[in-house]
Amino acid sequence: MESLTSSGQKTQVVTKLQDLEELYFQWKRMDKVAETILKTVAVLEDMGDKTSAGVCYANLAGVYLQMASEGQAEKVDEAEANFKKALEVIGDSDKRRNSYLLGSLGNIYLNKNQLDMAWEYYEKSLKTMQELGDLLGEARGYANLGNVRGLQKNWDGAQEQYFKSLELMEKQENRPGIAQQCESLGDVFIKKDEFDQAEDYLMRASDLYEAMKEQGSVQEVQNKLMFIFSQPKYLESRKQQIRETLQKPEVEKDSKLKLALLSDLGNVLFMANDWDEAGEVAKETVAIHEKSGDKGALSAALGNLGSILMQKQDFAGSEESYARCIELKEELKDQKGLQDLYSSYLNVLIMGGKMENAEKLVKKSLKANQESKNTPGIMFDYRNLGNLSLQKTDWLNAEKNYLKALEINTQSGNKAEMAEDNRNIYNLYLQKEDWNQAEKFALKALALSEEIKDYRNVCADCRILGNVYVEKKERSKQEVYYKKALESSQALNDPKEILIDLRYLGKFNMERGYREKAGENFQQAFDLSSKLNDKKEIAEDYRNLGNLAFSNGERKEAEQFYLKALELTREVGDFMGAGQDFTYLGNLKFKDYLFEDAESYFAQASECFEKTKSWTSLIKFELTVARMEILVSRYDQADEYISKARKIAKDLGDPEPIMKAIQEIEKLKDSVDKK
């Protein structure tokens, strides 16, 4: 190199420097790449080759951007400076490169949140693309302008730019571009609360991503659709639309149309957790299919009815529907349908306490799937055997079967299912209270969820890890994962998921004694639930604000919050929530030694839990109150609560964990009584 320079062979020097630059690039030594480009620029400028020097400035800016993306944030300013140098040198001599440089500067200002500057450079880049007649470049330019308007929260402006981009993408039949702009328009319509429009564009985007086999993008769009489908405003609007259509005379004459509408209404009611009406719609659908004799359609309708009855905790009715459904699917030899159905039927049998029948069902399914070499079916059967073993606290066989399912999914490379298997295993260890093993498998599940951009499960896995670190008393890690869960729920843009994570952080901060931070978290959650106008969620936030006030010694404020929560839970018929509210009010009075008032609240809490048939919650409540009574030497009252817990446990078959908890309370009573 030195000999070439000394002999004035500058062209050869440039060639050698470019070769050296390529080598450093391959070695990922970006600092050396930048250093080499600077040497090349010096030689080119000495040669008077301004155009080539301008290209080098652009390349150098690109290198600095890459370094910035890898953690060297200060390199963004150097990238900006070099893009400007390149722009100054190249000018209008190369319009295409000029447009690229303008667009790159727009990207930098967008990331710096200097939105007016970003708009200015994107607009200049767009005009150049229009002069060149580059329709794809023009379409991308409009998309960039849409991004700026979106960050400015100017949704109408963003919509206008994305529509222009979509129109040009459609003219060129550019599927990736069409999908991206449809997704962007879906995002805008979500912001505008125009959920029907959002659904249309996101469904179109999902179909295109599916056709292009871009599963990560499909998952992201599906998450957005699930958010739409969970919105009370959307669900209420859809219910009303479908009901009105069902009333039309022509619908009654067209059985196919009526069935399609009933199916849509059933789905909407299911999403809205409106189980009573959903059950009526499902029964009507079953009756229509029974008359028509369409066994395939009848089996599907019975499956839906079984799912709804399971949600209503009508396990006998659910079991009957699933049994009829399975019989029809076996007759139709619908193996895939049976595979999906067995898991649901199994859950009903387990929840109904029919463990023997459940085990027979799974073993029968496993044998059939092994004979037909149905690998997905075998995998589900191993999972179900794991679930059964878990219910019997047979930890060894539970893990063994979950690992067999994991092995099958690993061999097929199905990362979503691999993550689910790891979740099953960490759930096992959570029940065993083996926090180290739970942590190990939760981290594996989280890594897979992040890899496939399954943000909903990223949230779930992070929350579990946060809870594990609570048990391990590793506070710094608790905060890390609760915050990570919040970041993921915000990426999902799902308010209900965001609410969960704000509350987790609030409780974490309250337990740490960071009361101001806890107050901020709980208030943010309250503001969000109020915006959603979801009374059940608002009640939960009043409850949390009440707990914070109670921990701050503000008894009157706490009582007011609990009473506000109770008013809402009664209004919406949320007996589980009302049970919690009565419990908290009882605790408040109990702490003030107002035992008569406390017992009145506790009696009402017990009634609420009974109405929900949530026997586990009721036993937990009875034992919690019993412990409180023991600690203030009210032994007769404690015996009453323990007796109630024993009666419920007997009806449930005296489950080992519950009996163990009862025995521990009795030991506490004996030890306190002796003192």
Image (spheres, rainbow, N blue to C red):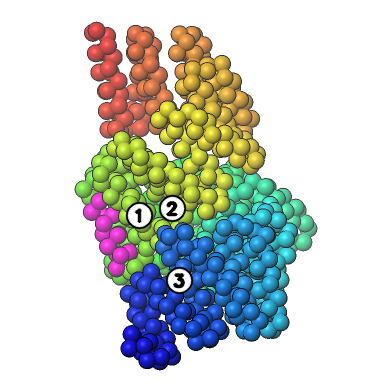
Whether residue 288 is visible, yes or no, is no
Per the rendered image, the range of residues in magenta is 399-411
Quarter containing the N terminus: bottom left
Q: Is residue 376 left or right of residue 503?
A: left
Please say whether residue 404 is one of the residues in the magenta stretch: yes
- Residue type at mark 3: give it: Val
| Gap between marks 3 and 2 measured at Cα | 35 Å
Q: Main secondary structure of the magenta part?
A: helix
Q: Is disc 3 placed on a helix, strand or loop? A: helix
Name of the residue lying farthest toward the front: 6
| Gap between marks 1 and 3 measured at Cα | 35 Å
Residue at horizontal 69%, vertical 84%? Answer: 133
List x then y, in percent, for residue 78: 50, 65
The residue indicated by pointer 1 is 445
Q: Is disc 2 placed on a helix, strand or loop? A: helix
Q: Is residue 376 left or right of residue 397?
A: right
Q: Pick whichever of labels 1 and 2 is earlier in the sequence.
A: 1
Q: Is residue 330 above or below residue 610?
A: below
Q: Is residue 454 above or below residue 270?
A: below
List x then y, in percent, for residue 582: 52, 22
Choose between 45 and 437: the one closer to the eye. 45
| Number of residues whose C-alpha sits closer than 10 Å to that of mark 1, classed few (under 14), some (14–19) or many (20 or more) | many
The residue indicated by pointer 3 is 63
| Number of residues whose C-alpha sits closer than 10 Å to that of mark 2, classed few (under 14), some (14–19) or many (20 or more) | many
Q: CB of mark 1 within 8 Å of CB of mark 2?
A: yes
Whether residue 462 is visible, yes or no, is yes
Residue at horizontal 60%, vertical 56%? Answer: 113
The residue indicated by pointer 2 is 457
| Number of residues whose C-alpha sits closer than 10 Å to that of mark 3, classed few (under 14), some (14–19) or many (20 or more) | many
